[in-house]
Amino acid sequence: MKTRIVRVGNSRGVRLPKLLLQQARLADEVELQVKPGRIVIRALRRPRAGWAEAARQAHERGDDKLLDPPTPTRFDRREWAWR
């Protein structure tokens, strides 16, 4: 698709058709990356996106066990009290 770079205040921009944004599944916030001769627009990666679902699935499979046995600390032995 061919388009033009237009003025937007003191900046420049590209108008993206709604259909193109829907097909790319892009939301209101995106990530821009510069490469030689191109600007890449992609969906914003959210830190830890999908972790809750992955943790739920791991629990269902029984894969959420501790790898090492618990190691009590001085606080655990002397100061901690269950109520």
Image (cartoon, rainbow, N blue to C red):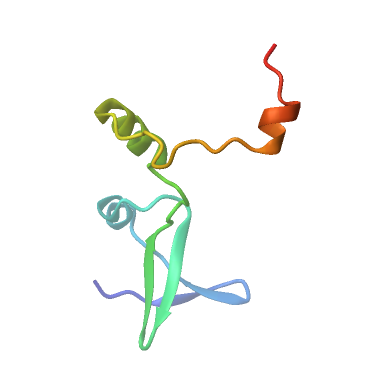
Residue lying at the far right of the rendered structure: 79
Residue 61 in the figure: left or right of residue 40 = left
Q: Return the x and y of residue 5 as percentages of the image width and height.
A: 43, 77
Q: Residue 14 occupies which quadrant of the picture?
A: bottom left
Query: Which residue is drawn at the image coordinates 36% and 53% (left, top)?
Result: 26
Query: Which residue is drawn at the image coordinates 70% and 37% (left, top)?
Result: 74
Query: Which residue is drawn at the image coordinates 30% and 50% (left, top)?
Result: 22
Query: Which residue is drawn at the image coordinates 33% and 38% (left, top)?
Result: 54
Examine the rendered structure and indicate whether residue 61 appears above or below residue 8: above
Q: Return the x and y of residue 81 as percentages of the image width and height.
A: 71, 19
Residue 44 in the figure: left or right of residue 53 = right
Residue 71 in the figure: left or right of residue 41 = right
Q: Return the x and y of residue 4 as percentages of the image width and height.
A: 38, 77
Q: Name the quarter where the C terminus is drawn.
A: top right
Examine the rendered structure and indicate whether residue 12 appears above or below residue 61: below
Residue toward you, 5 or 44: 44
Residue toward you, 50 or 22: 50
Residue 18 in the figure: left or right of residue 82 = left
